[in-house]
Amino acid sequence: MSARRRCIGHSRRENTHFTRWFLQYDVINALKKHDTQKMLMSVKSRFYGTANHEIKSRMLEIPADVLGTAASDWIREL
């Protein structure tokens, strides 16, 4: 999955950057060409297959940006 990183903050004391990843429009458009139900099943499988909350939050961008109402029942369950 391709994503773009944008720096949204900087802490001088700890010398760390906070970044925000987001799906690019060309990736969103490419994903929209795939079967919606198969993609939803894949996203759900990957979502439940990781304990990493950062990955889970990125995985939720696919239903939001690509699947729309096809994923609404699952999103409500979360």
Image: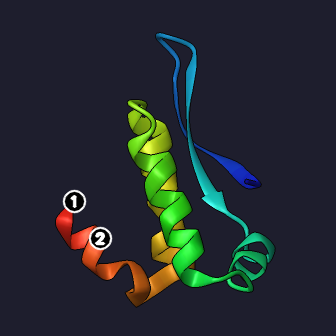
In the drawing, what numbered circle is on residue 78?
A: 1
x then y, percent, for residue 77? 19, 66
Mark 2 highlights which residue?
74
Q: Quadrant of residue 50?
A: top left
In the drawing, what numbered circle is on residue 53?
A: none
x then y, percent, for residue 34? 71, 81
Q: In percent of the image, x 65 and y 83: which residue is there?
A: 35
Q: In percent of the image, x 68 and y 83: which residue is there?
A: 32
Q: Is residue 50 left or right of residue 28?
A: left
Q: Considering depth in this image, is 65 or 77 the residue closer to the camera?
A: 77
Q: Residues within 10 Å of mark 1 (few under 14, many from 20)?
A: few
The amino acid on which the numbered mark 2 sits, given as a three-letter code, is Trp
Q: Quadrant of the N terminus?
A: bottom right
Q: Quadrant of residue 71?
A: bottom left
Indicate how the structure is coloured in the image: rainbow
> Pointers 1 and 2 in contact (CB under 8 A)?
yes
* 67, above or below 56, in the image: below
x then y, percent, for residue 44? 44, 58
Q: Is residue 26 left or right of residue 15?
A: right
Q: Quadrant of the C terminus?
A: bottom left
x then y, percent, for residue 10? 54, 30
Q: Residues within 10 Å of mark 2 (few under 14, many from 20)?
A: few
Q: In percent of the image, x 60 and y 50: which residue is there?
A: 21
Q: Secondary structure at mark 1?
A: loop
How many discs mark residues in the rendered view? 2
Q: Secondary structure at mark 2?
A: helix
Q: Is residue 59 left or right of residue 30?
A: left
The amino acid on which the numbered mark 1 sits, given as a three-letter code, is Leu
Q: Considering depth in this image, is 17 or 49 the residue closer to the camera?
A: 49
